[in-house]
Image: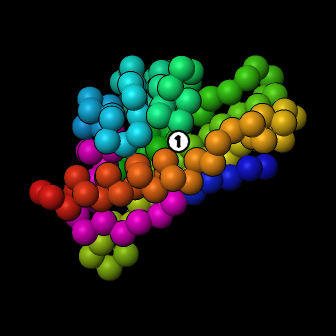
Amino acid sequence: MKTYETQIEISAPIDQVWQILTQEMPKAPAPFGILRLEGEIAQRAKIKLWSEVAPKRAFILRVEVFDAPRKMVWRGGMPFGLFTGQRTFTLTLNQKECVFHMREDFTGILSGMITKSMPDLTPSFIKFANTLKSMAEKR
């Protein structure tokens, strides 16, 4: 299993960070490293995403978990679980700050072969987290 993750403390209320993540980011995804995002972010909804990492490829994802304002999970991949990507967004409180954690796990019988050809997602994860922090703390 291949995993990427990032975590950052954000000096903003958890509800405000959640709103940016689920309502504002889809309307203006570029600063997050997302070229385009179609669909509503809601429980069991399908979304379509184009990222800077793979600009010519659309990723069709399902919002598997939408537990406001704490956790959201996007999942996508190939049929029969041959290759699955699952991105988990978690917001928790640490003293007075919101802690944002984002993790993506790649699993399935073809994951070893596919993840070898993927670029390193660490820089895009860090960009996403820093953008969220910047937007939330400016308010």
Q: Which residue is drawn at 56% across and 43% down?
A: 87
Which range is magenta? 6-23
**Residue nearest the observer in this picture, 121 or 66:** 121
Label 1 Cα crowd, 10 Å radius (few <14 / some 14-19 / many 20+):
many
The residue most toward the bottom is: 95
Q: Residue at x 71, y 34 (%)?
A: 84
- Residue 106 lies, in percent from the top left, at 71, 42
Q: Which residue is drawn at 43% across and 45% down?
A: 67
Q: Is residue 73 above or below residue 91?
A: above
User: In the drawing, does residue 80 fall left or right of residue 12?
Assistant: right
The image quadrant that residue 119 belongs to is top right
- Residue 74 lies, in percent from the top left, at 54, 36
Quick one: quadrant of the C terminus? bottom left
Q: Is residue 108 above or below residue 126?
A: above
Asked which secondary structure carries label 1, the reply is strand
The image quadrant that residue 43 belongs to is top left
Q: Is residue 9 magenta?
A: yes
User: In the drawing, does residue 19 fall left or right of residue 8?
Assistant: left
- The answer to whether one can see residue 3 in this image is yes
What's the amino acid at mark 1?
A: Val
- The answer to whether one can see residue 108 in this image is no
Residue topped by disc 1: 73
- Residue 31 lies, in percent from the top left, at 31, 41
